[in-house]
Amino acid sequence: MRIATFNIENLDDQPVPDNRRDREPSFEDRAPILRAQLERLRADVICLQEVHGQDEDGEPRDLRALKKLMQGTRYEDYQLDTTRLANGQDVERFRNLVFMVAPDYAFAEPAREIRNDFVERPAHKFATGNRRGEVADIGWERPILYVPVTTPAGDTLHLINAHFKSKRPTRIPGQGPDDFKWASAAGWAEGFFLSSLKRVGQALETRMFVDTLFDDDPNAQVVICGDLNAEPYEVPMQTLRGDVGDTGNPALNNRILYPLEHTIPEPSRYTLYHRGKRNLLDHVLVSQSLLRCYRTTEIHNELLRDETTAFAFDSKFPASDHAPMVAEFGD
């Protein structure tokens, strides 16, 4: 079994406006490169992030671009489940989370979105800007997506697909950013704090949900995949892992989640190249019950380029700005 995660970066098939054609690749430009990356994964299960939805006349919004991308590949007949609007029919226009599973796997039930179900929106009193002194609830924009999958062997695999809040500061009214500029360093710092709050809040909610799976089955086979926008040593990852060294309770040992990237040699251990620095922001974490059959992890980062120094626009290169990661398990 091979399980992969890939932030495919704003996958869409909409025509590129004339004034952006010189710096933004079209779907036709991107498709051959992305297909090759996906084929190389040879994955049975894929968790994708940043898959846009497309409108069809009189039809529910669908993942047309993704389905076009899969045509002619090993994934053409894979089953899909994804984030949706409240009507249960239309997918989100932007940045859907998507599960793809091989035909011999089965979704045991429809995917479930979790957002502020276990953690209420934190209250924040603005310290800067036009709303200074005002208290507001701060929620996170993206849910986590959960689905139980039945494997060909009849086991249940608990899959979680996540895209945590980026490190880009949250907008503060009256402080910015306006035209990419902040009115004050304090305003920028408050925005950075709010983004950190959202990211850790998503990690906490994920951890709390995972604990309910272990409550039902201490040996639950749990996999968390996604763009977590956090390095291995940062708070969101510590929150997810639940190491005994942090909890101080050996009775919780079976609930630890293990990041698999540590078996990759350190020079190759990165999924994003930003401002001359290699970052590991995408992760696959598994429960102890899956370690017995864990084999290896790969990060396919050969196509990564530092777009922030080479070009002013993230969309310059047709490949994604994130590298896919795939973990292999066997008997």
Image (spheres, rainbow, N blue to C red):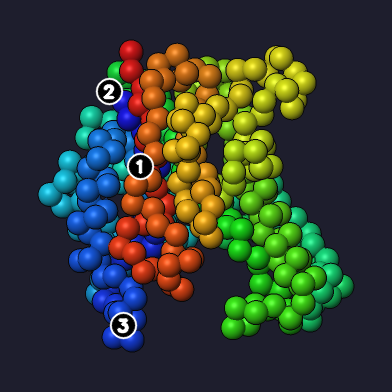
**What residue do we see at 38% from left, 20% from top?**
295
Q: Which residue is mark 3?
A: 17
Q: Which residue is mark 2?
A: 152
Q: Is residue 115 above or below residue 268?
A: below
* Amino acid at dot 3: Pro
Give the side of residue 179 with respect to residue 120, left or right: left
> Which residue reaches farthest right?
133
Q: Is residue 156 above or below residue 322?
A: above
Q: Residues within 10 Å of mark 2 (few under 14, many from 20)?
A: few
Q: Which residue is mark 1?
A: 300
User: Can you tell which quarter of the image residue 253 is in?
Assistant: top right
Q: Nearer the viewer, mark 1 or mark 2?
A: 1
Mark 3: secondary structure: loop
> Which residue reaches farthest bottom?
19
* Amino acid at dot 1: His
**What residue do we see at 25% from left, 35% from top?**
42
> Which residue reaches farthest left?
72
- The C terminus, quarter of image: top left
**What residue do we see at 36% from left, 57% from top?**
320
Front-lying residue, 303 or 166: 303
